[in-house]
Image: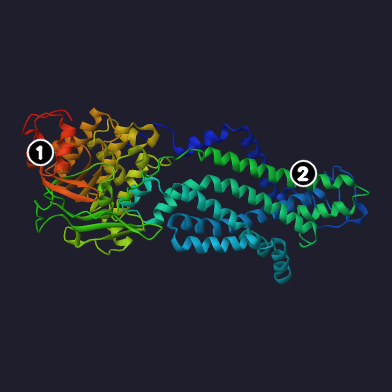
């Protein structure tokens, strides 16, 4: 199967067209390109040696030999402006590079990782902001001379707090997005997530800020040259402006050329950077935050198995794929009180088995799932007497070790499909990247596998979908894409967290049937997190009912529906069945609407 690359234009071409639709940005880009080209080609375009002094030709008006006239020393102004452009552009490039190299990596790590690094980095960059820049620059010039590199590197370091704060705030704004969890579940390392998903978020704002910094570098470098801190033998716009002021009484028009060069370049830089950022689509909002995870506020002790429950009815087999015994998830509040959101949970999943994890919102279902996947936040304290996947203990594993298991050994299907796909990348990019990284496939092989997976999950036009962006998909198609991504690396355990919540009834049935079919084909263990007992009856083998962080009843589906033992289970069934007779799993008895 081949990919139709002509289905829609690529991202680069669309961004180029978006930029070309901005007339101000196009004009600024043309002006900036002309200035850069003229500066680079100065040795060919300059009519005279910029340092050639001919006193007899001092302050000559514009002529054929001197298109912009001469300065007070008889030097050709046009030649000095062309060569001076090289100095100013180099100054801007050096300062921006130094600022980006200092600010972006630190901002990415501080915003993404937080913890102690955020505090230390913020303190360092706040200290840099408090330093008097001009005094630092004067000390550097006095110590190292008037060389362009040390001066502009120093200024770049002093300007890096702006980049750091901008990057850090942008990362903090998106680090709770659901597609970051999806990337972690797929087994991508933090470094890959940062430079693939996070960096795309800060790229636009950083481009705008970089254009400002580059313009500021040109102004500051010209100002230093104007004040006499530069090399007098080095042609520069600031130096030429200083020479013009020395002859201001006799030829005031000499300030026009260097002043226009500085102002025009800075203005073109700012407008071009803004237009370029707009073409990258940095104004797209990303508002779908991760749902707040429930935390019990009631400190009343609750027994591990409530009266009437039967949480131990299904003893774990010795060869169970997943074994969880006495799992507890605890959060410590600001006042020091500990709150257990999951308490003493024990469950198991065999290969080829579907376990339904049922309960109302806030019962601890998602917390249990994330604890198994190792995706709870750092402030969550997780403990268990036994927690293993296919005999391998998950207790105490480092993040790097857990990352090796996610995607290949265990995978996750979230409940909000549109929020778990990065809007900056195509479906194909998000499907193939984990496969190339985890399965060591070539780009072509990963693309072929992705097309096959999309076809298997019922996507009508796999090639077109592969080239689409998430906003171009319906909710049902997005959920199918996420399911394809979850099974792309052949996991042994699949955790589906409310996979049909945001879908209409018809699509819900199709997605559930797809999950069941994939689970049977691949003999996966499947944990289906849901609050819908109708869904449980359709595809689950066993069911564990959760309430307030506890499993109050855990039995085979048919037994639980026929004879619920816990009053909470009976309450859920009464709310679901509406006085109809209980139904058995997968069509053993006639089903009733849920």
The x, y position of residue 139, in whole percent, is 71, 68
Look at the numbered disc 2 and give the secondary structure of its residue. Answer: helix
Q: Residue at x 77, y 58 (%)?
A: 225
Which residue does the numbered mark 2 point to in the structure image?
Answer: 260
* Up/down of 16 relative to 141, above or below: above
Residue at the image position 50 percent from the left and 37 percent from the top = 15
First along the sequence among labels 1 and 2:
2
Task: Report the residue marked by disc 1.
Answer: 561
Tell me, yes or no, if residue 283 can be seen here: yes
Kindly give the residue lying farthest to the bottom in the view shown. Answer: 143
Residue 439 seen in the current view: no
Estimate the x, y position of residue 113 in percent, counting from the top left: 43, 58
Using residue 405 as the reference point, say whether residue 101 is left or right of it: right
Residue neighbourhood size for the residue with mark 1, other residues' Cα within 10 Å, grouped as few (<14), some (14–19), many (≥20): many
Residue 326 occupies quadrant:
bottom left
Give the structural element (helix, strand or loop) at label 1.
helix
- Image quarter of the N terminus: top left
As drawn, 115 above or below 208: below
Q: 185 or 82: which is nearer to us?
A: 185
Query: Residue 39 appears at what percent x and percent y?
Result: 69, 49
Residue 536 found in image quarter: top left
């Amino acid at each position: 199967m081949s990919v139709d690359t002509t289905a829609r234009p690529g991202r680069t071409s669309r961004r180029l067209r978006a930029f070309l639709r901005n007339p101000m940005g196009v004009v600024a880009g043309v002006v900036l390109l002309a200035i850069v080209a003229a500066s680079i080609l100065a040795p060919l375009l300059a009519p005279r040696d910029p340092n050639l002094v001919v006193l007899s030709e001092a302050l000559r008006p514009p002529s054929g030999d001197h298109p912009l006239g001469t300065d007070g020393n008889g030097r050709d102004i046009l030649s000095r402006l062309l060569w001076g452009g090289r100095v100013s552009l180099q100054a801007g490039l050096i300062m921006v590079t130094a600022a980006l190299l200092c600010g972006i990596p630190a901002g990415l790590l501080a915003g993404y990782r937080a913890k102690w690094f955020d505090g230390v980095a913020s303190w360092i960059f706040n200290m840099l902001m408090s330093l008097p820049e001009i005094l630092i620059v004067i000390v550097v010039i006095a110590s190292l001379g008037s060389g362009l590199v040390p001066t502009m590197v120093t200024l770049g370091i002093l300007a890096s707090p702006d980049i750091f704060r901008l990057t850090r705030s942008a990362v903090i704004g998106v680090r709770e997005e659901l597609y970051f969890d999806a990337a972690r579940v797929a087994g991508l390392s933090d470094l890959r997530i940062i430079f693939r998903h996070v960096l795309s978020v800060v790229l636009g704002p950083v481009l705008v800020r970089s254009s400002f910094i580059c313009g500021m570098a040109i102004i500051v470098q010209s100002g230093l040259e104007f004040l006499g801190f530069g090399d007098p033998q080095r042609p520069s716009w600031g130096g030429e402006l200083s020479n013009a002021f020395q002859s201001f009484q006799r030829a005031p028009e000499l300030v026009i050329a260097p002043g226009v060069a500085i102002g025009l370049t800075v203005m073109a830089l700012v407008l071009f950077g803004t237009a370029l950022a707009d073409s990258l689509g940095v104004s797209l909002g990303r508002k779908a935050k991760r749902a707040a995870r429930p935390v019990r506020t009631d400190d009343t002790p609750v027994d591990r198995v409530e009266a009437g429950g039967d949480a131990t009815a299904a003893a774990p087999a010795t060869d169970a794929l997943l074994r969880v015994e006495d799992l507890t998830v605890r959060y410590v509040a600001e006042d020091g009180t500990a709150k257990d959101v999951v308490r003493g949970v024990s469950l198991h999943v065999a290969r080829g088995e579907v376990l339904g994890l049922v309960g109302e919102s806030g019962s601890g279902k998602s917390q249990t799932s994330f604890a198994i996947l190792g995706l709870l936040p750092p402030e969550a304290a997780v403990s268990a007497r036994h927690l293993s996947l296919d005999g391998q203990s998950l207790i105490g594993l480092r993040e790097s070790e857990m990352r090796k298991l996610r995607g290949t050994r265990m995978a996750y299907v979230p409940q909000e499909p549109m929020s778990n796909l990065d809007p900056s990348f195509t479906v194909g990019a998000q499907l193939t990247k984990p496969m190339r990284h985890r399965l060591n496939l070539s780009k072509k092989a990963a693309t072929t596998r992705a097309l096959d997976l999309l076809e298997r999950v019922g996507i009508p036009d796999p090639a077109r979908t592969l080239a689409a962006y998430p906003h171009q998909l319906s909710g049902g198609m997005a959920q199918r894409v996420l399911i394809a991504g979850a099974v792309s690396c052949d996991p042994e355990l699949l955790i589906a967290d409310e996979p049909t919540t945001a879908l209409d009834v018809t699509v819900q049935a199709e997605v559930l049937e797809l999950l069941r079919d994939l689970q049977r084909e691949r003999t996966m263990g499947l944990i289906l997190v849901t609050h819908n007992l109708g869904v449980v009856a359709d595809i689950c083998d066993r069911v564990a009912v959760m309430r307030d962080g506890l499993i109050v009843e855990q039995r085979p589906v048919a037994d639980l529906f026929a004879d619920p033992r816990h009053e909470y289970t009976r309450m859920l069934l009464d709310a679901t069945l509406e006085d109809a007779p209980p139904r058995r799993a997968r069509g053993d008895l006639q089903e009733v609407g849920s």
